[in-house]
Image: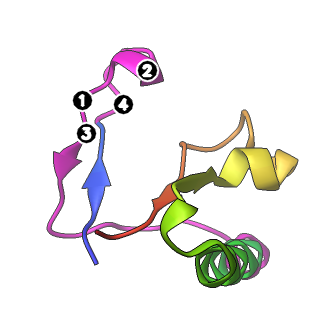
């Protein structure tokens, strides 16, 4: 597994350049963590189902409550 992230420095997401991270910290409620866990389970199932054709899924696209109020979380296939 690899972790990447972009600093929240006022740059629009498409222009932000991701950097490798050594650690991430999630500041979330128990309910948010359960929803994120369900999302990660969904991503794993999609990776199994789609195989090599799986590319990525955005949390905000899959669960609208995370769309505008949270940082972007994207799950890519590790190659």
As rendered, which of 76 and 63 lies closer to the eye? 76
As rendered, which of 2 and 28 lies closer to the eye? 2
- Contact, mark 2 vs mark 1 (Cβ under 8 Å): no
- Contact, mark 1 vs mark 3 (Cβ under 8 Å): yes
Q: Position of residue 35 (x, y in %)?
A: 77, 73
Q: CA distance from mark 4 to mark 1?
A: 11 Å
Q: Which residues are magenta?
A: 7-34
First reached walking from the N terminus: tag 4 or tag 1: 4
SS class, disc 2: helix
First reached walking from the N terminus: tag 3 or tag 4: 4
Q: Which label is found at residue 17?
A: 1
Q: Kindly identify the residue that appears in the image at 47 percent across and 67 percent down.
A: 26
Q: Position of residue 66 (x, y in %)?
A: 74, 48
Number of residue marks:
4
Q: Kindly identify the residue that appears in the image at 29 percent across and 35 percent down.
A: 7
Q: Nearer the viewer, mark 3 or mark 4?
A: 3
Magenta span: predominant SS is: loop
SS class, disc 3: loop
Circle 2 sits on which residue? 14
Circle 3 sits on which residue? 18
First reached walking from the N terminus: tag 2 or tag 4: 4
- 14 versus 47 height, above or below: above
As rendered, which of 61 and 9 lies closer to the eye? 61
Disc 4 crowd rating (10 Å Cα; few below 14, some 14-19, many 20+) is few
Does 19 sit left or right of 52 as displayed? Answer: left
Q: Quadrant of the N terminus?
A: bottom left
């Amino acid at each position: 597994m690899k972790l990447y992230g972009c600093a929240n420095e006022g740059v629009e997401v498409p222009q932000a350049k991701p950097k490798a991270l050594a650690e991430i910290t999630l500041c979330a409620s128990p309910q948010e963590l359960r929803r994120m866990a369900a999302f990660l389970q969904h991503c794993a199932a999609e990776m199994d189902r789609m195989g090599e054709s799986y590319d990525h899924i955005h949390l905000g696209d899959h669960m609208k409550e995370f769309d505008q109020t949270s940082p972007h979380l994207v799950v890519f296939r590790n190659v």
